[in-house]
Amino acid sequence: MEKIVLPGIPDFNQIEIYLANGGFESARKAFAKTPDEIIDEVKKSGLRGRGGAAFSAGLKWSFMPKTTDKPKYLCINGDESEPGSFKDRQIFEDNPFQLIEGAIITCYAIGAKVAYLYIRGEYNKWVKLMQKAVEEAYARGFIGEKMKETYGIDFSCDLFIHKGAGAYICGEESSLMNSIEGLRGYPRVKPPFPAQRGLWGCPTTINNVETITNIPAIIKNGWEWFSKIGAPKHPGTILFGISGHVNKPGVYELPSGTLLTDLIYNVAGGVPGNKKIKCVIPGGSSMPPLRGEQLEGVRMDAESLKEVGSAIGTGGVMVMDEDTNLLKVLLRISHFYHHESCGQCTPCREGTGWMEKILHRIDEGHGTSEDLDLLIRVANNIEGNTICALGDAAAWPVKFMITRFRDEFEKYVKKDISIPVPNKVHSMRETARPLADLHK
Amino acid sequence: MEFKFTEENLTRIENARKKYPTALAAVMETVYIAQEQNGYISNEVMEEIANVLSIDKVNVLSVVTFYTMYHTKPMGKYHIQVCTNVSCMLRGAYEIFDGVKEKLGLDHMQVSADSKFSLEEVECMGACGYAPMIAVNEEYFENLNKEKVFEILDSLK
């Protein structure tokens, strides 16, 4: 099976090993082409952004103006704060040089002299690991002023790490740019889009860490090779982070279009105690959840998940078994979005708070069926009425969880449900030990 | 209380400054450096940050009050952060959080009388596959249960 982003070669995060396996050869190959040829190659490969929206990476690059007297910038989004998403840290840890090489190639393609890698503040350890890798790449002349000599070209670029400080909203691209500029992480109104007016008002491209890490492989093996991996409309591999009630949670690199049931039962070892699945959130907490009965035949790519009324998001799969109290889950999700709402737009600032309060009321046993309708109404009044997608991200779980599990939520409001020990599974797992016997 | 950056930290700020076309952009890193030196961000610290970067104090204030990892009051020597978001919650995070609350006698964002511990219920830390987890200051501990968390707390001197 093809591994592109996490090849699993021992010590691949050491520059010697990376070089021994063809490291920085893709950059060399890229510099023999024109920037337009590279953009075209990436466009044809079908690579779609791995940060949530699954937008064509090559197309995004092509929006950058060709003639401008302003400097251009690349931002690499490693804010990774969506609950259920924990893939980028694996790249920082296991494959930092491919990310750096991808950044260099992207800078060349879009004409940027500076790239900022935004890493969330909590990832202090991974910031240090990346910093070390970047310094090594500088010292060896693969990046920075010395790269002119190394590759024999008239182009150089810099890569700086910008450490966040604890704000989910900074994963939103315009908010991320404000954060780099030293401002509060408030999203900006679009248009103008970053390619016209981004960092410091200059043309900017923002890509996810995983997207950028794919670039060297596409340059090395060609667009045709990449376009044939996985689902034709969403090709390549995807890092799936699977968590919750599975025996072997973790990050797995699999071809796009992998069956969700394969991911859960074959790759992640199934559900502890062979319990049934009640609910799966397929792409991080903001994506519409799926019912357990709905999982058969569902494939993990953008198009297939759209067909079943969800989305691929960041590929963060959260599995909940039959004993899960979905009210508590939804309450926790709503608390999160209320906490993380930046407060700029009234529908989101107020609506997320009200949704949390109503869910609290139900949780305390004072809910009614009308509350469930009210929740959906509040969610509908947030969705689409905010500057950024956090509003939608807060609305979707509420709207779809209640609509798709109405039967169960009716039971919560009528208090005729009894879940003996909700949400108590302990791992005590060293690496990938099954949980079942420890649960008894 | 007056606050001055150490010489070493002034060099670090100078290096951070070089990454960006504006001084304002270096504010987040500078606040981190200040927090590392002083433990928390007081008014005096904010004034000195504004001084050193030649930016308005309000710009420092707006950043310090927006991002959750900057503290405007002293935290404990060991700042215990328990993630209770969905993936952790599904694997028993609330049992851990309740246990820690009881053991330390602290609630969310409280500091112990001897300043040894402070407790925070945090949002998703990006360790969902290795849940439940806690962080002590900047270090992650993963694949936990209540007993293991208590062992960690007991080992902190």
Image (cartoon, coloured by chain):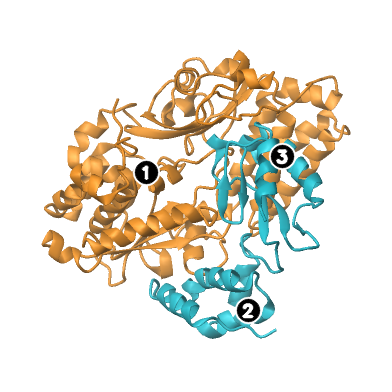
Question: Mark 1 belongs to which subunit?
Answer: A
Residue most extreme to the right: A366
Q: Quadrant of residue B39?
A: bottom right
Residue depicted at 66% across the width and 35% down the height: B145
* Residue A335 in view here: yes
**Direction from residue A305 to residue A33 in the image, left or right:** left
- The CA span between labels 2 and 3 is 35 Å
Return the residue at label 1. Answer: A94
Query: What is chain A's hue in the picture?
Result: orange
Q: Which residue is mark 2?
A: B45
Above-or-below relation of A109 to B8? above
Judge the density around disc 3: few (<14), some (14-19), many (≥20) Cα neighbours within 10 Å: many
Residue B123 higher or lower than A280, as above or below: below
In the image, residue B58 above or below residue A270:
below
User: Which quadrant of the rendered structure holds the C terminus of chain A?
Assistant: top right
Left or right of A35 on screen, residue A184: right
User: Is label 1 in a helix, a strand or a loop?
Assistant: helix
Q: Considering the image in quadrants, where does the N terminus of chain A appear? A: top left
